[in-house]
Amino acid sequence: MTLRTEIEDGVALVTLDRPERHNAIDLDTAAELAATWRAFRFDDAVRAAVVTGAGGRAFCTGIDRSVDVPQPPSPYSLDDPLLRIGPKANDLWKPVIAAVDGMACGGAFYLLGEAEFLIASENATFFDPHTTYGMVSAYESIAMAQRMPYGEIARLALMGTAERLGASRAYETGLVSELTAPGAAAEVALRRAAVLAAQPTGPVQGTVRALWAAREAARTQALAHAPQLIALGNLPPDQQARLFAARTRRGGRDEGPGGGPPVR
């Protein structure tokens, strides 16, 4: 299993458990996440949830690049295994808090974009490597554009691995709602989730649904364009592979929070 789930006093702690891969998501993990959120819909013992990553070095670094996902030849469709990993994509309206320690990048934004709010430790960093590797940041940017000022997400998405958004700046711009000491994000998120779980679950779920509805129309329209933008803008897979290999030799995506460009 690549996902750990613990339930106590109405709160589920969902932990991505691939620390040796910086909690990158393979196909098994993607399927487990979707199944977990769907199961929570029918589990009265779960009234709120926290999602986090194991190991302290990373919340999640997106899709595992060792995964081969064959793509259809049509520019009008896209097989993206991460599209169904979030709670909202699985019709779960119980509140979810994301607890971020270390790196959160690329495909991690699918999860962050569907959480009610983010709690991050002071050593958290956010970045999006897509453009550096010859890929369009579409779904990820759309998700985060719902949570961040336009200029901030534009800078993050367009500058690729050259840009690292630190926890303090993420807090200043509203992406993160609360900062904690290093390693304490999950603990604090569980305390906040306990408050959510203590409220009547029907009104809480209705409020989550209302909040999501406030931005759903714009998000849905933007997502409709994503497959074509990706098909038109992505470099061919062989060129992507060369860029990824070159970057990895210099440290690249798997750098710790202290590596890479300055964190702002």
Image: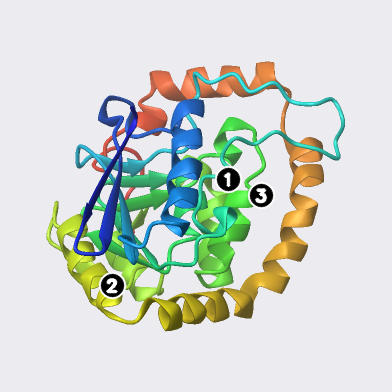
Relative vertical location of residue 154 with respect to residue 147 in this rendering, above or below:
above
Residue in the image at 50% along x and 55% along y: 156
Residue in the image at 60% along x and 40% along y: 131
Between the C-alphas of marks 2 and 1, the distance is 24 Å
Picture disc at residue 168: none
Relative vertical location of residue 174 with respect to residue 184 in this rendering, above or below:
below
84 displayed left or right of 231:
left
Q: Alpha-carbon neighbours of circle 2 within 10 Å: few (<14), some, or many (≥20)?
A: many
179 displayed left or right of 37:
left
Closer-to-camera residue (29/228) = 29
Closer-to-camera residue (192/165) = 192
**Residue marked by disc 1:** 84
Closer-to-camera residue (165/29) = 29
Q: Position of residue 238 (x, y in %)?
A: 67, 16
**Residue marked by disc 3:** 138
Q: Quadrant of the N terminus?
A: top left
Between the C-alphas of marks 2 and 3, the distance is 33 Å
- Label 1's element? loop
Picture disc at residue 197: 2
Residue in the image at 70% along x and 21% along y: 70
Q: Position of residue 16 (x, y in %)?
A: 33, 39
Disc 3 or 1, which lies upstream in sequence? 1
Between the C-alphas of marks 3 and 1, the distance is 15 Å
Q: Alpha-carbon neighbours of circle 3 within 10 Å: few (<14), some, or many (≥20)?
A: some
- Label 2's element? helix
Q: Position of residue 258 (x, y in %)?
A: 23, 41
Q: Quadrant of the C terminus?
A: bottom left
Give amino acid for label 3: Ala
Disc 2 or 3, which lies upstream in sequence? 3
For the residues bearing labels 2 and 1, Cβ distance under 8 angstroms: no
Give amino acid for label 1: Arg
Of circles 2 and 3, the one toward us is 2
